[in-house]
Amino acid sequence: MQEQLTSVPTAAVRPLAARKGQARFRWQEVSGFLFVVPWLVGFLAFEFLPFLASFALSFTDWSLGREVNFIGLQNYRDLLQTEPLLRKGIINTVYYTVFHVPGQMILAFVVAVLLNQKVRGMPIYRTAYYLPSVTSGVASAIIWIWLFQPSGIINRGLALFGIEGPNWLVSTRWAMPALIIMGFWTIGTEMVLYLAGLQGVPESLYEAAEIDGAGRWHRVRHVTIPLMTPYFFLTAVLGIISSFQVFTPALVMTQGGPGDATVFLLLFLYWAGWEWFRMGYASAIAWVLMGMIMTFTALQFWLQRYWVYYEFQ
């Protein structure tokens, strides 16, 4: 009788526990999906569907308030064969990217190394360096207009060394360098990534290198930099993507001038869509820009096998 009381409930309880476990697992799946639904609806309504619509519109001559006519590849032919602003926008965007991305990476890495030291009040310094990254782009541009004035702080600082500063934003030669310098203002995101990477480098590697006689520079060259290459790769990819989409400084500070010296691809797209009201043409510009970004990103992923070191390899 005792054996029946102990064996029967055990056999009956196991399937019941399994069913409860399955029910709990299904509810976790459902609750997780419910949490994702608001984002999913927003993504479909405001990103994915406009993404598809822009591709369809790029084959039309649609302007605001007019009917839509299918014109095939005409927008792309006009862009690639007869549009001078596209060539100017590509040259300026590549010029900005070539100087902005490496400069931003080097500056952010140097700042991260300094902020990785063990000194009092370091959280305050780290916060101070990150704050510009969360500042409004328009507000930052207005501040930098004031800084780049002929009698602004930058020219006054140059004057202390006997250098006569240019009239930055109205000079075809200096307007682009001014925007590149302004871009270094927002190194906070890269700095945080580098700081996280530096704090993940094992101290044992530095100690082993020091025992082998490596000096400070050799420890940086043979330990720090190889282990930081995944972070360099990530910031390079993100930096090139964001540089190809630079827009606010050119719109607020120079309006693409002087003499189209600061016309970027995204500013050209904005003019086509919201000043000329040629939505089909603007959609074609957007897809040309996307093709360029995808090409450069794919090239970076192909090249990373030759210089990026992963510990799990």
Image (cartoon, helix red, strand yellow):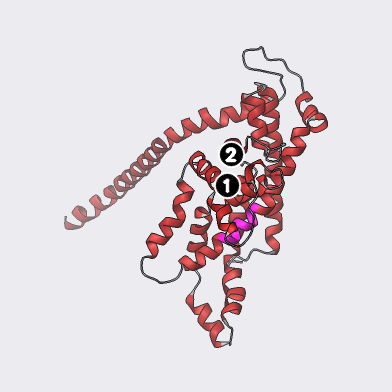
Q: Secondary structure at mark 1?
A: loop
For badge 1, the amino acid type reads Phe
Whether label 2 touches label 1, CB < 8 Å: yes
Q: Position of residue 270 (x, y in %)?
A: 63, 30
Residue under the image location 63 percent in, 43 percent down: 169
What quarter of the picture does the N terminus occupy? bottom left
Using the rendered image of the protein, determine whether residue 197 is visible from the camera's viewpoint: no
Q: Nearer the viewer, residue 18 or 176?
A: 176
Q: Secondary structure at mark 2?
A: helix
Q: Position of residue 65 (x, y in %)?
A: 62, 13
Q: Position of residue 296 (x, y in %)?
A: 70, 48
Q: Position of residue 297 (x, y in %)?
A: 67, 48
Using the rendered image of the protein, determine whether residue 49 is visible from the camera's viewpoint: yes
Residue 52 shown left or right of residue 137 in the figure: right
Q: Please tell me whether residue 282 belongs to the stretch shown in magenta.
A: no
Q: In the image, which disc is placed on residue 148? A: 1
Compared to residue 7, the image places residue 308 above or below, namely below
Q: CA distance from mark 2 to mark 1?
A: 10 Å
For badge 2, the amino acid type reads Met
- The residue at which mark 2 appears reads as 253
Residue under the image location 62 percent in, 17 percent down: 64
What quarter of the picture does the C terminus occupy? bottom right
Q: Please tell me whether residue 105 belongs to the stretch shown in magenta.
A: yes
Stretch in magenta: 100-107
Compared to residue 213, the image places residue 68 above or below, namely above
Q: Nearer the viewer, residue 104 or 167?
A: 167
Residue under the image location 70 percent in, 29 percent down: 284
Residue 216 shown left or right of residue 33 in the figure: right
- Reading the chain from its start, which is encountered first: label 2 or label 1? 1
The prevailing secondary structure element of the residues shown in magenta is helix
